Image (spheres, helix red, strand yellow):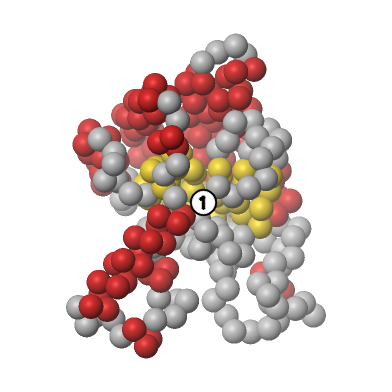
Amino acid sequence: MIGPQVASGDKSTENIIPDTMRHTGPRHVAIIMDGNGRWATQRGRPRLFGHHAGARRVREVVERCPEIGVGYLTIFAFSTENWKRTQTEVAGLMSLFRRYITKEARALKEFGVRVRFIGDRVRLDDKLVKLMDELEQLTENNDVVHLTIALNYGGRDEVARATQRLAEDVAKGILDPAKVDQETLPKYLDTCVLPDPDLVIRTSGEARISNFLLWQSAYAEYEFIDTLWPDFSADEFTRLCEAYGGRERRFGGVTV
């Protein structure tokens, strides 16, 4: 795996944080890609114009990841709350997702990107789900960058679905309820095979997490920046990752 192998969550009962955990780059970066609509409105264009511009930024950021040691990148593409937008915008976004997967599949494969999708697929149309499945299968042996796309995703929804699966295993006798602890639930989350994010970036000047990776980001560092997503560059991404390296992550412990 590319990049430093850094602990990504509060997995230890130790009070003291080792020196090796204090000044390292992020292994896993998650991004709330916000501001596409405002970017388009500022230019007198429809909101979907901004979404198309934002989609083009994803490749630039993905390609920068191995250069700076980021092995995992998770992007928030469409939330469970985004269905509240106009029918025209939602339909346009779904068309954009299908087009993006079709257009980028070969490049992602050749660049060594392993693609995963998280979120509830039940509400998505069959053609899109088929493309998602095919892209996951096409890239399943890649490991240069692990790109996770959150599509029809919400943190509360994810925890609810995980809890339901956990309860089903308890009912079947597979899981002893007395042994359920904070290490159990993550095994049922959509992100069960991923490390927790070290750094979460939100573009566009909004300072909220919008129901994104609620469980996984308990100890993540956050960066809320004013840049609208279509203007977000690989160089700014690099700068934020470098700034992360100067932070001291204590995970509730103390430094010595």
* Residue at horizontal 41 percent and vertical 71 percent from the top: 185
* Residue at horizontal 51 percent and vertical 51 percent from the top: 212
- Mark 1 lies on a secondary structure that is loop
Amino acid found under the numbered disc labelled 1 = Phe
Q: Can residue 25 be seen from the camera position used here?
A: no
Horizontal arrangement in the rendering, residue 52 relative to residue 131 (left or right): right
In the picture as drawn, the residue positioned furthest to the right comes out as 256
Locate residue 219, reporting x and y percent: 61, 65
Q: Is 219 drawn above or below residue 238 in the view shown?
A: below
Locate residue 197, reporting x and y percent: 55, 58
Q: Can residue 126 be seen from the camera position used here?
A: yes
Q: Which residue is mark 1?
A: 212
Horizontal arrangement in the rendering, residue 231 relative to residue 109 (left or right): right
Image quadrant containing the C terminus: bottom right
Q: How many marks?
A: 1
The part of the image, by quadrant, that contains residue 13 is: bottom right
Horizontal arrangement in the rendering, residue 217 relative to residue 112 (left or right): right
Q: Is 254 drawn above or below residue 225 in the view shown?
A: below
* Residue at horizontal 58 percent and vertical 73 percent from the top: 10
Q: Nearer the viewer, residue 1 or 91?
A: 91
Locate residue 96, reporting x and y percent: 38, 26
Horizontal arrangement in the rendering, residue 196 relative to residue 240 (left or right): left
